[in-house]
Image (cartoon, rainbow, N blue to C red):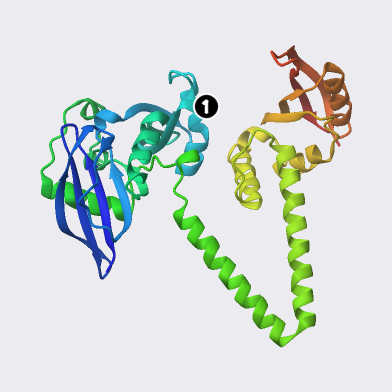
Amino acid sequence: MNKLLFIDIKESEIVAYIFERRKGSYEVSDVKKITGAERYRFSLDGLPRDIDTAYVSLPLGSLNFRVIDIPFSDKDKIREVLPFELDGIVLGGADKIVYDNMLIGSSAKTCQVLAVYVDKVLVRDLLDNCRSYHIDPAYITSIELRSMGNDDFSLKNLLSPVTIDEEKRISLAAEEIKAPTINLRRGEFAYTRTIEETKRYLKLTAILAILIMAVLSAGMLFNIISASSETARLKKEMRREYQALFPGEKNIVNEVYQIKSHIKELKEKEQLLSGISPLDMLLKLSRIDKHQAGFDEISTQNGNVTLKGEAPSLRDVQDIKVEIEKFFDDVAISDSKTSAGGTVIFSITAKEKRH
């Protein structure tokens, strides 16, 4: 029987709900008041020591919100574009916050998204406090945000005091354990225990497999090791090519999935592409000599291609232009300027080759 801890931080107090998992459901077994001089510096003494997983809920007053209209509804894709949407709005830029999103409405062409974010300092202080008691929360969410729902969501409710009785809060906490409304443990604060457990399991499985193969056939073991080495080499080569295409993308988890995602985004703009094949365009760009430059943005519209990036010098930009002319027509350097670091930020326009 697994015990789970849900820390419910309210505006005026902090409460811990102890849940036990029974036949796929979560039943509360104990409720404890938590004391502390500060909201995110509280004591967890007196809680059970056999906690399997912990979760934390923040009140609405600790969260910040922005409503943004975005032309797609996939939460992961929305999360990718949120830094660009929030960068000019948030004091200090998007690098200073942790963010997530939830859909609150949609129309034929756009989806209305509620961007939810908090300062990284808040998340760091909260996690440091929990870890000092050997507790590492899997989620940082908000049951008060969940209580508003999506169907009858109202922006003015975000600014109003939230009153939810304890029985309802416990019920919402159980729902959050199953599927959080938001999760502010992302980026540098991502929950890693599950990943580490998976790594240990895979490592153990690999060791057992190798031992079995060694018993069955030394030759087979040699082939497996060779295949594994080749796979690692191919993965390394694939990552190198991906980073060359998208040097600004730092979080690379699955190159195949992510390149498919980029292609899918281009296909969604099919009406603007005028016959340009996204895959063909990316393949052409991967073949050119970039002269130590990188493309930060690739866009197409009405048969035109715009490439934006950064190069060591203007001469390198000219060389890149010559390379692009091998695959595209009407290639021109539309903009170039020197950055504070001495590099050249450039824009190159081109058209699909006429046959």
Front one among 12 and 258:
12
Location of residue 264 by image quarter: top right
Front one among 133 and 236:
133
Amino acid type of disc 1?
Phe
Quarter of the image for the N terminus: give it: bottom left
Q: Secondary structure at mark 1?
A: helix
User: Left or right: where does residue 325 sit relative to residue 249?
Assistant: right
Establish if 55 lies above or below 250.
below
Establish if 210 lies above or below 350.
below
Query: Looking at the picture, how far across and down is residue 355, in whole percent?
Result: 86, 37
Location of residue 252 by image quarter: top right
User: Left or right: where does residue 211 sit relative to residue 143?
Assistant: right
Establish if 172 lies above or below 274.
below
Query: Looking at the picture, how far across and down is residue 83, in whole percent?
Result: 50, 29
> Residue at image x 85%, y 23%?
316
User: Left or right: where does residue 88 sit relative to residue 46?
Assistant: right
> Residue at image x 10%, y 43%?
165
User: Left or right: where does residue 278 sit relative to residue 78?
Assistant: right
The answer to whether residue 303 is visible is no
Tag 1: Cα neighbours inside 10 Å, few (<14), some, or many (≥20)? few
The mark total stands at 1
Query: Looking at the picture, how far across and down is residue 2, in whole percent?
Result: 29, 65
The residue under label 1 is 84
The answer to whether residue 222 is visible is yes
Front one among 304 and 26:
26
The furthest residue to the bottom: 216
Query: Looking at the picture, how far across and down is residue 74, in whole percent?
Result: 47, 43
